[in-house]
Image: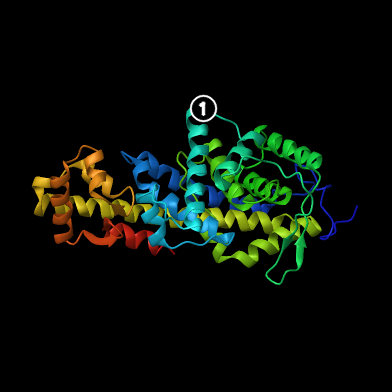
Amino acid sequence: MTYNKDIPYNNLPLLPPNAEIETKEILKKAISANKALAELRGWSFNQSNPLLLLQSVALQEAKSSSEIENVVTTNDDLYQAFATPSDRNIPPATKEVMHYKEALWHGYEKLHNEDYPLTINMFIELFQIVKQRSDGIRSIPGTVLQNSLGEVVYTPPDNQNDILRLLSNLERYINIPDDVDPLIKLAVIHYQFESIHPFPDGNGRVGRILNVLYLIREKLLVFPILYLSRYIIQHKTDYYIALRKVTEANEWSPWIMYMLDAVEVTAHQTLCTIERIYCAQQHMIQVIKEQASDIYTKELVELLFEQPYCKINFLVERNIAKHQTASKYLKKLCDLGLLSKIKKGRENYYINNALWDILTKIN
């Protein structure tokens, strides 16, 4: 049956694609993308506590990924919520971003600690965390994807049996080894998941989490540190054009090239960001040792780089200092220009100036 954007795509072709996906051009691009990714992966082996520098970067990815689906929050709301997750006044959009980050780390821990495969059950778990729902695969027809003018651009499969059939095929494609370059395969996986569109909502966010989890599963990354959402935002039109070429004409090359470029560019940008965070951390250590050596501890500096916002209670909870002493520590760091103090409601927050600037000015 000929593809029609107005009719549910229940006959979406199964994987592997019936097309040449390893052309000379694609393989050449895959080499450079793999090289950039290897440099990023190599960085993680040279850090004593790499996860420390990843928490805030992951939160920025959660923000960007949610923004693609028009879930928009501010950096200020986001980091304030991260510092005080129990606050009842957290805006709904900010809560959604926090749920995205929670789902990302849930998936990472499953892979890292349990060697969990990327299965339909994993997809559902991620969806349920992202959307805070207890259901799963779509069972009600009527889902359509529209552009900003309200025009239908794609109608995903709407028969639950077909959705499950397609997901089972995708699951096998992900987990059964073959000779296809993993980055090329990543592009195929991402297209297929987005085309199946298995959930009532949050498909884009779940799909982008699966991207980084797949790279970890394939040992191309050790930690979840490559996030493509900002690249997609910056090249959103090209993203949708390339997707449609696959759907409408089985033209895979533009889509695969787009994804390989996204990996390469993002790997370079992420490495630059993480190196800047590391340098800022080393600078803080130097300043404290030279001008306030009596308050310096490795644990204090690490805490200040877990997220831009810090509170007195954080130091107390980590047994770094008692409440009064912790207050003096943070005041001293403000006097040195390393932190800035702001008051939000009844809470005092201490912002790591260097970390804030790096994370909120990512290109």
Rendered view: 332 above or below 55? below
Residue at 47%, 61% in the rendered image: 73
> Is 310 left, or right, of 213 in this rendering?
left
Q: Is residue 153 left or right of residue 99?
A: right
Query: Residue 146 at x, y = what percent?
Result: 72, 64
Quadrant housing residue 121:
top right
User: x and y percent of residue 215 in the render?
Assistant: 55, 42
Q: Is residue 101 visible?
A: yes
Give percent across and percent down for residue 248.
80, 59
Q: Quick one: which residue is furthest to the top in this view?
A: 114
Is any atom of residue 265 visible in this view?
A: no
* Figure coloring: rainbow
Q: Secondary structure at mark 1?
A: helix
Specify the quadrant that holds the C terminus.
Answer: bottom left
Using the image as rendered, state which of residue 210 and residue 278 is in the foreground: 210
Nearer-the-camera pick, 85 or 238: 85
Q: Amino acid at mark 1?
A: Glu
Q: Position of residue 56 (x, y in %)?
A: 39, 51
Residue in the foreground of this view, choosing between 337 and 279: 337
Give left or right: position of 25 versus 153: left
Q: Look at mark 1 in the image and give the residue it sits on.
A: 114
How many badges with numbers are in the image? Answer: 1
Q: State the residue at coordinates (62%, 58%).
A: 258
Residue occupying image coordinates x 48% and y 47%: 101
